[in-house]
Image (spheres, rainbow, N blue to C red):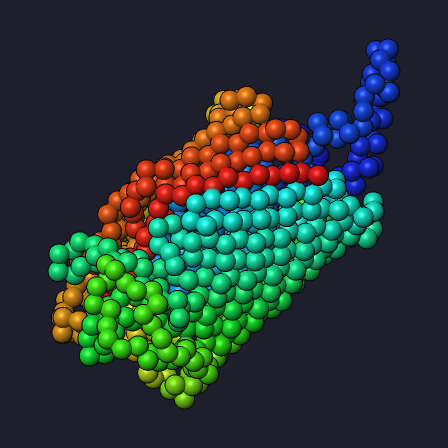
């Protein structure tokens, strides 16, 4: 917390200073002209355009949340409920700016997140859907994804073409996120229409593995109070060294902003995305030797697909009621679809005479959400208080089913190291829905950040969520209906006796509801409804998590470099335990804990060298479990009596790190690279015990990039991913029959032209 804050007048109307560049520039020009005139300098010699560029510190198509002149450092979060800069927020945050995203060469959210410290991936399985599945600090986060501050349900592919920034909040934070968020949450920030400038940028790229990509970003200022923006995408490529696996994506984000009055701003956007992919299930763990069977891609051209689609419409209203009170309202309507037939090699058996196994599923998700915030920033009892009072409504309606895959192929795939990708022939039939889920949530929350004095700031927040859960299973011909409430809180202290640094402490909680993972149905072991074999599911308590954290943040290099460090402990209690696809479960019988340290750096290390670094060193432990050595469990090996207590959590890397550097060698030429490290990781069921036999080795991957500006309008960028062609694995199915392979070496060149 800078000492200058107490000396600076504040007003919620300050946002309007950026709404009208004409009036802003006019005031600035008048002030500078007057100053120059007193020294005998003609004001006509100074151009208005140059003044605006220097004063704003960022281009119109730049990231509005980044620190000016430090493209790898985010200054603030997009969520207005986070009322202080990142450096003054008592919580661990990892933020990837637009520049860091672009220069990384990665275009999928899952690839960007999996490279960040403390984040791993999960596979699709029989108990949960194939799709983007994230695990933060060892806890499932596939339903903790937000876009522009509103929850975005559904396991869909998420692209970067329309993103301004990616914000990762670590640790339980249900005061902001609502249900879930045990390990943290992810908020993606979209590019929005602005009234700063008219521009059009076209980028086209070609690369290895039949890579093709074209994007368009155009912003048009229609008048002094209205602007529109359009982002478009087309991309097509094979998976490096794993064809016919590959991806084809198309996307559009159209947005408009209208400054209706000095106090009222209305904006709207529509997002459409379509993916038509073929998914590679990778290798398999040899359960006898513990080694990896390096199978050919089992993708079958005649049957396989993974199609995703999203149509989302959002309207946002901002109204300045007075100098110190602002109203914000966001309303979203959306539909997402995820449907797939994915083939893996499983070996010839009576159940699978061809040697192939199909995973199939489809989900159709309709949702509506509304968030209303009153933000009050004023002095109370001689102290600055920034109060956020809000109410939120959300309704998700999810229909789920699967496909029937019948084959007319004769014989079997008996050589998994030389698979015929055209072996399969037959029919694929979409079945009617097997379940319907309606989940309605109404939430209220109150937060306050109090600047006590120059060196102490206090944050406190509380949230209550009331939900109504209705699941109909067509296969069981059963209705599962219940409702409950969740109460969560968050406290933080920021102690800043120094000009550029602080230390902080925070306490925060989160809650997970029974059946909260919409794609899991009644598969208790995968986040589906537990104790669904009787009415006992109505009496199951929410899972509860508590996070304790102490840390420090330092703004250096004229606030262009942020250094962070944090010690944390997350304890999850009332854990719902279930075996595999079991609907019964054992109730709230588990408890686990994750402890660790996380370090971070972002910004300008020197005037020419920029970087972003993160490292997490963590340990996990099952503290209590139904499976304590006295309870029988039926599985592949028959009936056993496992003892999970003392084991690590699955899908959990004890150590992980990511470093991205950029060096501006000349005004035109820059180059850099990324190194990503992950330690060994074991498979297993979510919130179960790590497997003794299903393990993935550690890995280190290097990427490189270079950019050259031919002019202000034309530039070229080259990327090489996985420079050393390291063979590494990012996720494993609990039984080991699916091992996701990290992409092999690839290269691409992109040409960008700005009109």
Residue at the location (57% across, 54% down)? 234
Q: Is residue 743 above or below residue 589?
A: above
Q: Position of residue 122 (x, y in %)?
A: 35, 58
Residue 343 showing in the rendered view: yes
Q: Nearer the viewer, residue 631 or 608?
A: 608
Q: Is residue 634 above or below residue 549?
A: below
Q: Position of residue 529 (x, y in %)?
A: 38, 74
Residue at the location (51% across, 73% down)? 364
Q: Is residue 389 left or right of residue 529?
A: right
Q: Quadrant of residue 22?
A: top right
Q: Position of residue 119 (x, y in %)?
A: 38, 49
Q: Is residue 195 above or below residue 361?
A: above
Q: Nearer the viewer, residue 327 or 532?
A: 532
Residue at the location (37% across, 83% down)? 535
Residue at the location (29% across, 47% down)? 728
Residue 611 showing in the rendered view: no
Q: Position of residue 345 (x, y in %)?
A: 26, 66
Q: Nearer the viewer, residue 12 or 686?
A: 686
Q: So how many labels did they put on this image?
A: 0
Q: Nearer the viewer, residue 434 or 473?
A: 434
Residue furthest bottom in the image: 477
Q: Quadrant of residue 661?
A: top left
| Quadrant in the picture for the N terminus | top right
């Amino acid at each position: 917390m800078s000492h200058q804050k107490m000396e600076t007048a504040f007003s919620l109307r300050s946002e309007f200073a950026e709404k009208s560049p004409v009036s802003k520039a006019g005031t600035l020009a008048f002030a500078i002209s007057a100053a120059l005139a007193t020294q005998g300098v003609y004001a006509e010699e100074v151009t208005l355009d140059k003044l605006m560029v220097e004063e704003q510190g960022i281009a119109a198509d730049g990231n509005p949340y980044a620190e000016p002149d430090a493209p790898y450092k985010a200054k603030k979060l997009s969520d207005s409920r986070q009322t202080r800069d990142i450096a003054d927020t008592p919580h661990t945050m990892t933020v990837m700016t637009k520049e860091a995203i672009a220069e990384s060469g990665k275009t999928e959210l899952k690839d960007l997140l999996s490279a960040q410290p403390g984040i791993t991936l999960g596979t699709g399985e029989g108990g949960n859907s194939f799709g983007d599945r994230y695990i933060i600090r060892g806890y499932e986060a596939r339903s903790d994804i937000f876009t522009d501050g509103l929850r975005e349900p559904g396991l869909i592919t998420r692209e970067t073409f329309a993103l301004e920034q990616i914000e990762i909040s670590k640790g339980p934070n249900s005061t902001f996120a609502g249900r879930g968020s045990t390990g943290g949450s992810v908020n993606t920030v979209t590019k929005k229409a602005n009234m700063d400038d008219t521009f059009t940028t076209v980028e086209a790229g070609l690369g290895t593995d039949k890579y093709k990509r074209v994007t368009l970003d155009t912003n048009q200022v229609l008048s002094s109070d209205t602007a529109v923006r359009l982002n478009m995408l087309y991309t097509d490529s094979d998976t490096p060294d794993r064809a016919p696996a590959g991806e084809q994506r198309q996307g559009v984000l159209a947005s408009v902003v209208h400054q209706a009055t000095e106090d009222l701003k209305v904006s709207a956007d529509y997002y459409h995305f379509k993916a038509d992919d073929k998914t590679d299930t990778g290798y398999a763990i040899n359960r006898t030797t513990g080694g990896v069977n390096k199978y050919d891609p089992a993708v079958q051209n005649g049957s396989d697909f993974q199609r995703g689609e999203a149509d989302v419409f959002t309207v946002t209203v901002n109204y300045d009621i007075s100098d110190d009170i602002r109203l914000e309202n966001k309303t979203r309507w959306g539909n997402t679809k995820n449907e797939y037939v994915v083939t893996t090699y499983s070996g010839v058996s009576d159940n699978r005479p061809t040697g192939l196994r199909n995973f199939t599923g489809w989900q159709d998700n309709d949702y509506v959400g509304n968030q209303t915030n009153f933000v009050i920033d004023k002095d109370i009892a001689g102290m600055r208080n920034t109060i956020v009072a809000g109410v939120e409504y959300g309704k998700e309606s999810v229909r789920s089913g699967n496909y029937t895959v019948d084959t007319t192929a004769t014989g079997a795939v008996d050589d998994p190291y030389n698979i015929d990708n055209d072996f399969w022939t037959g029919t694929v039939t979409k079945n009617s829905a097997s379940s319907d889920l309606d989940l309605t949530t109404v939430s209220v929350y109150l937060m306050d950040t109090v600047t006590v004095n120059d060196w102490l700031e206090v944050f406190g927040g509380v949230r209550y969520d009331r939900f109504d859960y209705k699941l109909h299973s067509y296969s069981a011909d059963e209705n599962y209906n219940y409702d409950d409430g969740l109460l969560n809180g968050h406290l933080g202290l920021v102690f800043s006796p120094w000009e550029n640094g602080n230390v902080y402490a925070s306490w925060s909680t989160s809650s997970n509801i029974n059946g909260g993972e919409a794609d899991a149905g009644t598969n208790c072991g995968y986040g589906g409804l537990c104790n669904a074999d009787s009415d006992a599911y109505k009496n199951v308590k929410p899972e509860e998590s508590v996070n304790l954290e102490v840390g420090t943040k330092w703004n250096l290099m004229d606030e262009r470099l942020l250094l962070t460090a944090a010690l944390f402990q997350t304890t999850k209690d009332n854990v719902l335990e279930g075996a595999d696809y079991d609907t019964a479960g054992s109730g709230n019988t588990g408890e686990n804990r994750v402890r660790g340290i996380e370090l971070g750096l972002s910004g300008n290390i020197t005037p020419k060298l920029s970087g972003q670094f993160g490292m997490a060193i963590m340990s996990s432990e099952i503290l209590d479990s139904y499976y304590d050595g006295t309870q029988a469990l039926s599985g592949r090996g028959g009936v056993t009596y496992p003892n999970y207590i003392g084991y690590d959590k699955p899908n959990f890397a004890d150590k992980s790190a990511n470093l991205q550097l950029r060096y501006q060698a000349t005004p035109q030429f820059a180059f850099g690279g990324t190194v990503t490290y992950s330690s060994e990781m074991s498979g297993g069921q979510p919130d179960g015990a790590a497997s003794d036999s299903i393990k993935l080795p550690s890995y280190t991957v290097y990427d490189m990039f270079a950019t050259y500006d031919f002019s202000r309008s034309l530039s070229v960028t080259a990327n090489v991913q996985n420079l050393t062609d390291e063979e590494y694995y990012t996720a494993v199915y609990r039984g080991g029959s699916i091992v996701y392979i990290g992409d092999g070496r690839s290269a691409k060149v992109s040409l960008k032209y700005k009109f």
